[in-house]
Image (spheres, grey):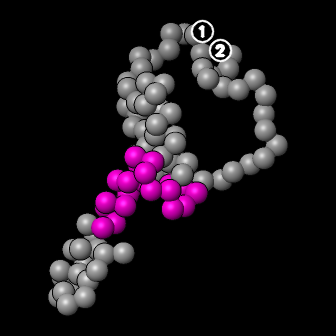
Amino acid sequence: MADTNGLSRREAAARRARWAAEKERLRRLGRLCDSRRALVTGGLAKLIADREWDRNIPPALPGQARGRWVGSPQGSWPEKLTVELPADLVTTT
């Protein structure tokens, strides 16, 4: 946590805000895994970039959107994991 001893309320709030922004940046890079959300978000952001899903893809042609999604597994897993992901992890247009 950011040290705020001896600071005014405004300076302390600004320091805490900078520290919160830095923690979020580190989580997005996958370098700070202090929660399940951070662990999944960091790994998912890397996977999206590795698969080049972080770019605009032209819309599918009629009849082209049949079958499984690209990269979808052939089976399923009995275990479930619920994680709230940041809304801006992927932008769509």
Q: Residue at x 17, y 80 (%)?
A: 11
> Which quadrant of the rendered structure holds the C terminus?
top left
Q: Residue at x 45, y 17 (%)?
A: 59
Label 2: few (<14), some or many (≥20) within 10 Å?
few
Q: CA distance from mark 2 to mark 1?
A: 6 Å
Image location of residue 68, percent across then percent down: 67, 20
Q: Quadrant of residue 64?
A: top right
For the view shown, which residue lies furthest in the bottom direction?
Answer: 6
> Which quadrant of the rendered structure holds the N terminus?
bottom left
Q: Residue at x 78, y 47 (%)?
A: 79
Closest to the observer, 42 or 10: 42
Seen in the picture, residue 28 relative to 2 is either above or below; the reply is above
Q: Quadrant of residue 52?
A: top left
Disc 2 vs disc 1: Cβ atoms closer than 8 Å?
yes
Closest to the observer, 66 or 82: 82
Q: Is residue 85 left or right of residue 29?
A: right
Closest to the observer, 16 or 87: 16
* Residue receiving disc 1: 63
Q: Which residues are magenta?
A: 19-38
* Residue 76 in view: yes
Label 1: few (<14), some or many (≥20) within 10 Å?
few
Q: Is residue 63 left or right of residue 4?
A: right
- Magenta span has 51? no
* Residue 84 in view: no
Q: Residue at x 31, y 75 (%)?
A: 2
Image location of residue 45, percent across then percent down: 46, 40
| Residue type indicated by callout 1 | Gly
Seen in the picture, residue 18 relative to 69 is either above or below; the reply is below
* Residue receiving disc 2: 66
Q: Quadrant of residue 58?
A: top left
| Residue type indicated by callout 2 | Arg
Of helix, strand and loop, which one carries label 1?
loop
